[in-house]
Image: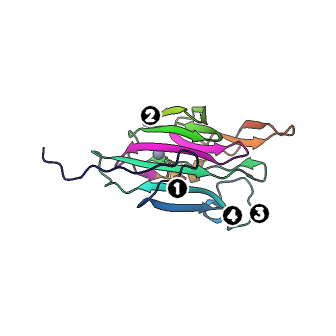
Amino acid sequence: MIPNMEPFTRSVDLLSGAIAADAVVEDRRVADLHGYYLDDSGAEPDRIIYRLYAVPVPEANSELQCSTTVIEPGRIGREYHMTKGHFHAHRDRSEVYLGLAGDGLLILATEDGRHRVEPIRKGSLSYVPGGWAHRSVNIGDEPLAFFAVYVGDAGHDYATVAEHGFPVRVIQGDDGVPLVMEHPGHRR
Ligand code: M6P
Ligand code: ZN
């Protein structure tokens, strides 16, 4: 084949997760996540929950999307800061996470009601097979940063998660320790 893209190199700050130069930066704030948390009524709508840095790559199944996510420490009510979470619009597309900094959990769920909880920390490599929705949660006191690479045309299906939720939520227990609890509102 004759390639139609040029090779390139970008710099990832391994401590902060920031990607330099032309990365597309997007902030997700409390207001953007309304409905994802049990109760966000006490949280300032402008507070940044997480920041995404995405290297612009065509959305084709021959390409690989590369991004970092940095989740600030904190809670909304008793729930730890977390991403929206999504299935891939093309369900069979997979993804890999490499933990860079902080202390987190990766929550995975299938449409038939199974779930898994995996750690995210410096050096953790998590494989997200097709068909598993994924959400990351910062359970530490420092920013949680991880690198993700996924099939170029995977796409994000947020609607299924927004409608059904994840089977578990991560909250701070009475002793201050993170607790993974069944989510009563979750429907199959
Ligand atoms: C990772 C990848 C991205 C995703 C981001 C935030 O970097 O999975 O595709 O956008 O996490 O997660 P979400 O889009 O669910 O808020
Ligand atoms: Zn994904």
Mark 1, Cα crowd under 10 Å, few <14 / some 14-19 / many 20+, is many
Q: Secondary structure at mark 4?
A: loop
Left or right: residue 5 versus residue 135 is: left
Q: Tell me, yes or no, whether the highlighted magenta stretch contains residue 141.
A: yes
- Asked whether mark 3 lies closer than 8 Å to ligand 1, one says no
Q: Earlier in the sequence, mark 1 or mark 3?
A: 3
Mark carried by residue 52: 1
The answer to whether any part of residue 111 appears in the image is no
Q: Within 10 Å of the Cα at label 3, are there few (<14), some (14-19), or many (20+) other Cα atoms? A: few
Pick whichever of labels 4 and 2 is earlier in the sequence: 4
Does the beta carbon of the residue at mark 4 sit less than 8 Å from ligand 1?
no
Question: Alpha-carbon distance for marks 4 and 1?
Answer: 15 Å
Query: Mark 2 sits on what residue?
Result: 129
Q: CA distance from mark 1 to mark 3?
A: 24 Å
Residues tagged 4 and 1 counted as in contact (Cβ below 8 A): no
Q: Nearer the viewer, residue 166 or 58?
A: 58
Tag 3: residue type? Ser
